Amino acid sequence: MSLRRLWAVARKEFLHVRRDARSLGMGIAMPVLLLCLFGWALTLDVDRVPLVVWDQCGSQSSRDLAAELAGSRYFALRGRAGSYAEIERAIDRREALGALVIPPDFDRRLWTGRGAPVQLIVDGSDANTATIASGYAQAAVRGYSQGVVLREIRRAGLRPPAPPLDPRARVWFNEDLTGRNYIIPGLIAVIMMVIAALLTALTVAREWERGTMEQLVSTPLKGPELVLGKLLPYFAIGMFDVLLAVLMGAFLFGVPMRGSLALLFAMAAVFLAGALSLGMLFSIVTRSQLLASQMAMVLTFLPAFLLSGLMYAIPNMPAGIRAVTYLVPARYFVHLLRGIYLKGVGLEVLAPEAALLAAFSAAMIALAMRKFRKKLT
Amino acid sequence: MPEARPPGASPAVSARELSKRFGDFVAVDRVSFEVAPGEIFGFLGPNGAGKSTTIRMLCGILSPSGGAGTVAGCDVGREPEKIKARIGYMSQKFSLYEDLTVEENIDFYSGIYRIPRGRKRQRKEWAIRMAGLAEHRRTRTAVLSGGWKQRLALGCAVLHEPPVVFLDEPTSGVDPLSRRRFWDLIYEMAGSGTAVFVTTHYLDEAEHCDRLGLIYRGELIALGGPAELKTRLMREQVVEVLCDRPAEALEAVAAVPGVREVALYGAGLHALVGDAEAAAPALGARLAAAGFRPGRIERIAPSLEDVFVSLIEERDRAGGAVPEVER
Amino acid sequence: MFERVWRMMVKEFLQVLRNPRMVGVIFVAPMIQLVVFGYAATTDVRRVTTAVRDLDNTPESRELVERFVRSGYFLVAERAGDDARVRWLLDRGQAQLALCLDEGFGADLRGGRTARLQLIVDGTDSNTAAVVLGYAGRITGDYSGQVLAEGLARAAGAWQPPGGVELRARSWFNENLESRNFYVPGVVATITMLVTLILTSMAVVREREIGTMEQLMVTPISAAEFIAGKTLPFALIGVGDAVLIVLVGTLWFGVPLRGSLVLLFGSLLVFLTVALGVGLFISTLCQTQQQAMMSTFFFFFPAILLSGFMFPIANMPEPVQWLTYLDPLRYFLVIIRGVFLKGAGLAVLWPQIAALGVMGAAVFTLAAGRIRKTLA
């Protein structure tokens, strides 16, 4: 292996990237854009769900109940409705995502010891928000309910019993349940896949299509030297993106970093090498830019984005799909990233995933080097 | 610069029954020839004849389906990588990197060929000077005209002063003045002992070569120096017929007995005849009878084009028409 | 004139259908998205792996654990022996929830004292954690309420405590809150946009790249004919893909289609003008097919993220919400979800359709203008 030849290729590739605004944009602007979007704009957390109230009872208690719901940070009172038709209109026009309907006999049932049902209508088309909103509403109603009971007990002169169960709920690793802390660390995996899919997947194929590869294979340049030389600039861009993500995560978004930075960068480097090699493998095998980028999109980027546990939790997926996610290298990397960032653990916990990633990367690099043929057909 | 070898030394390039098949299609069919050091060998043929395929096999970037060959002492089938260190190759698309500057392209190939540090500057300056690009060192190759690109590509291909150089249609799409300059460079290289293997479909360039191989539909149909080919291979003789309205006169001339072929050539016609002495007066009479005004009608030395066309037509007649396959 | 447009259309169709890569884009991409968004993309929380550390082991503690299991949401992964083990499981993500009961839990409950328990949730996935907390809270709340009621009945005798308030949640349009009913209609929108965008932008650029554009420029073809010939085939393919996805979505995934098919496909056509216009516009910015692909991605990916397809627009900060008004996908998603799940009609959806119409006209005119300049 000649370092000189490798370096010649790396330097040339670096010049190409520097001069191609689109590639640079993809390599740096897109990650920054993604970080900003996920850091500030995109979240599945539920807050301020717009609600309308149809209070058919109109008593003090029913008004208290409505206020309890509306006062929580999860709901925002948008107005009052007088009929199901009005509720329907509000939901249709997306002015409200839900409605609290208090029946006229609410008061009577409450004070005569029977259960007093109230209805919560949610727009189910956004299943996620609906589920979470229902959960919050349940908790608020329960709180109100217990409050009423305890007040009455005191008024009756009885000693209020201690609440039987006192669940202390503690949230580990992401105490405020901030969606951002969940997404940003894992986003690093996706960013790398973008570079692999869109940049390295093109580079070898482009030379074949332009004819410069024919020239190169007639020289003493060896396959491994070409592959590694071409990887270097994209590797540099990728690691720079990791640095950007870490800095933005820390200073812009306040994502806690509890584990070892060194481990993070080391794992990122391992994963990046593998992801880039995979992208390049497509380029080497197909010798067509179009085909390579499409394959890379579908086989690396999409799974990294949707099946790695970044967006959607893997345990929630059906068994068949869960099985498939074992084949997605990004899955292990996202797990590693979250472990390092939020759980503050190191190799003693993450060793299996780290080992798998290392194996993946080594295999990809070896495969890319093997598959590159210095022949025309 | 490598010294010129004494005659009788081993050939720089040799091909023995070299063949290449793509499925059912035979692109190169048992081609054999030798190129001596310091010789300019031209491979001539129409598009799709197998020129590029042959060059690629010799360069080690395409595996032969059959036969054998050696380049600079290394076997084409078994030692392709060793060959690559000893040749310069200029592919048909002059593969330069369009978004890199002249200097950057040279530096790149300089690294690829591992030009020793001591020689690096020197070879770079040589290449720039040779290509006439001293004023354009930092220009992107994309904006250079064809002639400059061509010379630059050549320079990049020979930075490491290889003993054998392969040029695949190096002058296509380049203006005549640049072509001339390019051939001067080829002469220089050959003069210092480099074997130069050129493919071309320009017949006038073929005249510049020491020896020629005529390739048609994958077969080598002629091998020898230009002069030799012109005298030895043609069975017919060529008669030049000048007259008014040559396009219309074509038919009349073709009908004259003894005329094998006739074609437009420049402002007149070239007729291939068995016996020029007999044919000339007959032609003149026939033209006059048909109402033309014949001018000079005399035998001329055949051009390479005549030779080539004649050989090809003979081949076609013998083998039957085969549709041309675009590769 | 129709003859020329027809000829161009036939040529485009042939070029696309003979190109296996294009066929891949047209058929493989929708299928993959359907599988992923139909099955994998779900925020439903199931199978919460739970570690139970029960140091009490009384009927009361066992009853509590039983209730968790019976709810169907929780899966007891392991009965841990101590806190260290709980920590180990949570660190490795082998448990998402830990239920920790200390000795004396049952005794406290029976004795009318407050019994403590610890719920430890792995907050890494904040979304799931919120839902888990909600479920767990409900279970403990119910148990607590029941014990309280029993205790009160014994202690208070005749006095009737007020009845509890019970919340009955009803979901409109998507009764079982199936995630796929949310995503699959959206896939119609995203795929149609993706396919038409890619095909249109690449088709024009391909001519430029291989040089046939120059050839076309010297023919009498007018800009309008050229554009029609380049966009109509892909509009047809886009509609074809949409039909395919609607069929798979309704027949295979069982997503309800409550609204009018006419409205659906009518608004699809309006949406397509925007997609085609953007595709054309991108093509005027690129010289190679590769650049076209990259530029399409650069536009498409943020467009999807900001469209409300995965992330609710209402949760975005105000300035970003304003930005989404520029995203054609946003409007079409409202239309599509409205037609599928809500059976919404023109009366409700006309603002979206109008917006798409305006956008389509604007983008198309812009793109057409630029193309006219290159052909002139």
Image (tube, coloured by chain):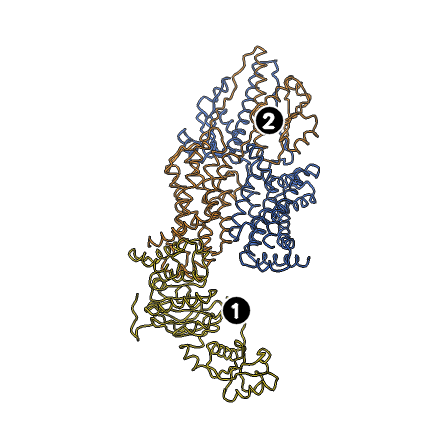
Q: Nearer the viewer, residue C310 or B161?
A: B161
Left or right of A12, for residue C72: right
Q: Chain of mark 2?
A: A
| SS category of the residue bearing label 2 | strand
Quadrant of the image containing the N terminus of chain B: bottom left
Picture colour for chain A:
orange
Q: Is residue A308 above or below residue B231?
A: above
Left or right of C348, for residue A41: left
Q: Is residue B238 above or below residue C275?
A: below
Q: Can I make out residue C342 in this image?
A: yes
Q: Nearer the viewer, residue C18 or C118?
A: C18
Mark carried by residue B325: 1
Q: Can I make out residue C27 in this image?
A: no
Please name the amino acid that badge 2 sits on.
Ala
Chain painted in blue in the figure: C
Query: How far across and down, in percent of the image, does residue A12 sit?
Result: 40, 52
The residue that label 2 is drawn on is: A76
Q: Is residue C111 above or below residue B286?
A: above
Query: How far across and down, in percent of the image, does residue A36 sit?
Result: 49, 37
Picture colour for chain B:
yellow
Query: How far across and down, in percent of the image, does residue C173 sit?
Result: 65, 36
Mark 2 crowdedness (10 Å alpha carbons): few <14, some 14-19, many ≥20: some
